[in-house]
Image (tube, grey):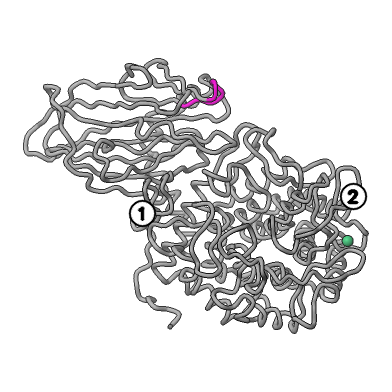
Amino acid sequence: MPLLTSAQEKVSRTQAEFANVLDIRPGVKGAESGYFFTDLGGWHGYGMNPAASQELWGGFRGPVVMVGRPGIRWLSDMLERFTLSDGEGQPIPYRKLVTAEYQPGRLLQTLDAGDFEVRQVEIAISPRTTMTETRVRNRSAAAKAIKPTWGGTVTLKDAKVSADKGRLLIEIDGGKRCCVVSLPEKVKLSGQGYVAEGGSAEIAPGKEVVFRTFTSYCPDGGPEKALAESDKHEPSRSDSALVENSKRWQGYLDRVLGANTPYMKIAANRDWAVKSLMTLHTNWRSAAGDLLHGGMYPAADRFDAFWAWDSWEHAVAAAIFNPELAKDQMRTLFDYQTPEGMIVDLIALEKKDNNNACSKPPIAGWAAYMVFQRTGDKDFAREMYPKLAKYHRWRYEFRDHDKNGLCEYGGTGDSVHYGQWESGMDVAVKFDGVKMLKNAEGAWSFDQESVELNSYLCAEKFYLAALADAIGQRSDARKFRDEAMKLREMIRSKFFDEGTGFFYDRKLGTGDLVKVADVSGWIPLLSKVATPQQAARVKSAMFDPKLFGDYYPFSSLNHQHPNYHPEQGYFRGQTWMNYAYFGIRGFKNYGFTADAERLTREMPRKLQGLDQRGPAIRENYSSAIGTGMGAQHFGWSSAFSILLLTEDADRFSYVPDGER
Ligand SMILES: [Ca+2]
């Protein structure tokens, strides 16, 4: 197949051209409970109702609110339903739902109400407030009177509904969080429901009237805080809000779609890239509660916190289209760096829900380096470098049991789970039977050195050296580079098996290799640790149909292993987008360019639904048949999609040169 199947076609660039690349209605196969759209780091959002539900025409599904852990709550199927009646109060029914579109950055729908056309659009106007604008156009030849009405019922159990100066107030979790809906008319309460009726207004032929409603939600405060947010939206700001929304989203689209790569010339890949962009934005949460900076959740309905390594992966992609969000995504985890230097597994809206039991793989240096390369922001490098260096040093103090310069995964206690979580690979087969060894008070290691962990650390030394150089800390840079060269030699000689041509973990004490061929084996290619000969042999193993190569060669476990299960159990046979990216990036590092390009082009056929309009981007995929599995609307899968499709246009080395 030629690389450029559609080189001549016009490159789509506008919000409207990407309508419904994600289907967020309930009842869609594989996503029965539906999804939603949020923007600007909002903690509430709206979705789309099924087109057949006529009683739900006239508004958007929701709102849905995020409550920290656990997850999300829908307040209603439709809390702000807009209906029309004529001057005499006779209802003017909707005849047809003409369009219903989830576009990048906004929800839109058009309704046919006989003589009137009703157009509705929903956007975020601040990190706490959304706006729904409704335009009613008289398309008859005569002047007509209308009366607008809004109404709805809060269906969330235990929500307390009240009114404040005509606004609807919904308190949840005993008033700990609060939502305020501000309508053009005062609300009249009735149980958990309300109506807000407007007076009669005349519309001249061909003319329209505009109504706006606003919803403000605070996940970290009661009525006073939410009402203060509600007070902030002024009519003058609302007038320009849609224009600002288009401008901002056009910027995101241009930065991603404008990458000069062959992949971006293919329409389906552009849909894939924009789906990824939309997914990451709906996962965006602004600073709130104990989260001191914003960032992106892995998946807003299921992974309701900022996880460390997800965050580094999100940041690398966000640096392309939203650099300030990328920087904040990194800062937010470092706000909770421990005095010893550890970055914890995850942080949440309420810090009592943080998981301090372990850390995560060390790719923060990579992320900071990539953000720096894309932004050239030396202040950011100066801000992050000491924190990153401290985190890097922490690993050698608290996760190298035998002090041989090769680290182990571990945790702050003796539970094996901690080490499994710290690896990010949970129940990966190579960890079967591992033991925890005490290093110090609150510091434990597996009795096993990870090839992948040490490969990341080796690359991180080069990234830290590059950052140190950039801010003039030359002696630090030299030191990190010297360490990296030494570690590289150790990994090459101690973790590679000549017999099978693959990298493996090794046991403490004996140095015996744990010969379970899995995703860790190609991380030395990602981090440019492998020799060219080793890299070629790893690639051969990945393409061997008996091991990884029978479908798409990035399975989390080789297919010969008796515990290989392509559709169940974390890291026992699913394909994950981060490791697929790491493999493809590794191939590029060693000049296996044709393979890297072919595997990128094949990805949306092999991991189902990525480039199709409608389906969500998933957490992982069956390595046997490519079915999407796990969470919907997954952040790092989206981040790596954007990187794969755009990064070949970048002009900097992905692992800095170690030979200087
Ligand atoms: Ca060690």
Mark 1 or 2, closer to the camera: 2
Taking depth in this image into account, of 365 and 45 the one nearest to the observer is 45
Judging depth in this view, the residue of 418 and 578 nearest the camera is: 418
10 Å crowding of disc 2: few (<14), some (14-19), many (20+) = some
Q: What amino acid type is highlighted by mark number 1?
A: Asn
Image height of 114 relative to 224, above or below: below
Q: Residue at x 57, y 62 (%)?
A: 640
User: In which quadrant of the rendered view does residue 392 lie?
Assistant: bottom right
Q: Which residue is mark 1?
A: 20
Give percent across and percent down for residue 515.
77, 72
What span is in magenta?
173-179
Compared with residue 59, is residue 601 higher up or lower down, i.e. above or below? below
Q: Residues within 10 Å of mark 1 (few under 14, many from 20)?
A: some
At horizontal 92% and vertical 65% (from top left) the residue drawn is 509
Looking at the image, residue 481 sits to the left or right of residue 594; the answer is right
First of labels 1, 2 by sequence position? 1
Any part of residue 73 in sight = yes
Pinpoint residue 71: horizontal percent, then vertical percent: 54, 38
